[in-house]
Image (cartoon, grey):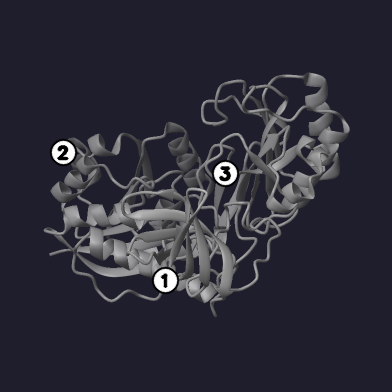
Amino acid sequence: MGRKQTNKVIFENITVLDAGAKGVSVAKAPEGQVIFIPNVVPGDVVDVQTFKKRKSYFEGKAIRFHSYSQNRIEPLCQHFGACGGCKWQNMKYEQQLFYKNQEVYNNLKRIGKIELPDFEPILGSEKQFFYRNKMEFGFSDTRWLNETEIKSEDQSLSKKPALGFHIPRMWDKILDIEKCHLQEDPSNAIRNEIKRFATENNMMFFNARNHEGLLRTLMIRTASTGEIMVLIQFFQEDKKLRELLMNHIADQFPKITSLQYVINSKANDTLYDQDIKLHNGRDYILEEMEGLHFSINAKSFYQTNSDQAYELYKITREFAGLTGNEVVYDLYTGTGTIAQFVSKHAKKVIGVEAVPEAIADAKENAKRNKISNCEFYVGDMKNVFNDDFIAQHGQPDVIITDPPRDGMHKDVVEQLLKIGADKIVYVSCNSATQARDLALMDEQYKVTRVRPVDMFPQTHHVENVVLLERR
């Protein structure tokens, strides 16, 4: 049943049916339109107030619960609902895995429209909290207020600064975070102490609209080795205050391996074009996997769940089925982690990556790990695999590809088809774009194995590994 209230439609006694894309759940209106609803669990029965209407769907929020799903649990985090990071924290973990597996299957079947083998069981994460090795926080001179704080009518709350996460779809709003359950301590202790000390010493937090202030962002990286990196991004240089804060962090947290900063006065806060300065320690931390060590600097890409990255790479290696005689090409190799991880089972591994700094790190890591059968090259993936490159490095028996969320460029897919390796292992963080690419290769390659891997518990994100073999 639906009724209008102040130009908004309220649907009553709506059963939530499914978990959809981007972490929201799905229901159906009486006339058949889809309703997207955040912070509910399939099986909940709710009244929904809509705030957006399109021809085929509504967006809304639950304003009353008539009954709760048997798969609902109490969220652990006090910031759940306001922070957009852990949208599934109110859902039992086994159900999270079910819906992630279903999303991969639906994407491969509906978008790819290809023949699929039986999926191998989705690999859940042993850690469901405190699993991330990288967190980024924003400073704001005016904190975002949650519903409880707004109802308190305490006007002074909004004047307090914040150090936390951006509110979803609000680039200038920061939710102050007291405790995050995604990264192990001392992450929370470091963040809270930085906020306390900066506030006490009247350091200006950033105002994104006016583009002013001193403190802009904070990044904390941790490694399974116990090493810690902290990077403060300042909007402008103030040597006295900068040194005051950086020295305090170093004194309070002597276990920090790498303490760095950057002065960034440009329009956005991306680090990749910035000159990063070392305040204390060394400019990288070390990650370890099966005795291999990988240096992680402030700009490095590394899988953000170290424990599950190990499991993901083991599945990738297993799918490749290496015997020690194969030439392997590793596309989008990054800092060469997968390439080096599989190298002892291959004759030779050729890693290709478009980012020069990443290839420099890959070469340094290979040297550190005393690996002599890995070679790394900088190049645009769609251009590098010409006849001369193949002639120089050899016809690959196996190709491993781990592209970004957008998937592979169609020219890269064409190159893969032209090369015609016996096997392709496709690792993806976006099964929708993966499905698109698999469809393009379907005439020449058959999907013979599929296994999703949960890298990000409490969220809707999921990795997927596919083995393709020549028909």
Along the line of sight, the residue nearer the viewer: 119 or 62: 62
Mark 2 surroundings within 10 Å by alpha-carbon count, few (fewer than 14), some (14 through 19), many (20 or more): few
At horizontal 37% and vertical 62% (from top left) the residue drawn is: 464
Q: Secondary structure at mark 1?
A: loop
The label number, if any, that marks residue 17 in the structure image:
1
On screen, residue 458 above or below 363 = below
Judge left or right: residue 112 versus residue 368. Answer: left
Q: CA distance from mark 3 to mark 1?
A: 42 Å
Mark 1 surroundings within 10 Å by alpha-carbon count, few (fewer than 14), some (14 through 19), many (20 or more): some
Quarter the N terminus occupies: bottom left
Q: Which residue is mark 2?
A: 387
Q: CA distance from mark 1 to mark 2?
A: 52 Å
**Comes first in the chain, label 3 or label 2:** 3
Contact, CB < 8 Å: mark 1 with mark 2? no
Say what amino acid the circle numbered 1 marks.
Leu
The answer to whether residue 323 of the structure is visible from this angle is no
On screen, residue 191 above or below 127 = above
The answer to whether residue 231 of the structure is visible from this angle is yes
At horizontal 41% and vertical 60% (from top left) the residue drawn is: 35
Q: CA distance from mark 3 to mark 2?
A: 34 Å
> Looking at the image, is mark 3 or mark 2 nearer the viewer?
3
The label number, if any, that marks residue 105 in the structure image:
none
Q: Which residue is mark 3?
A: 296
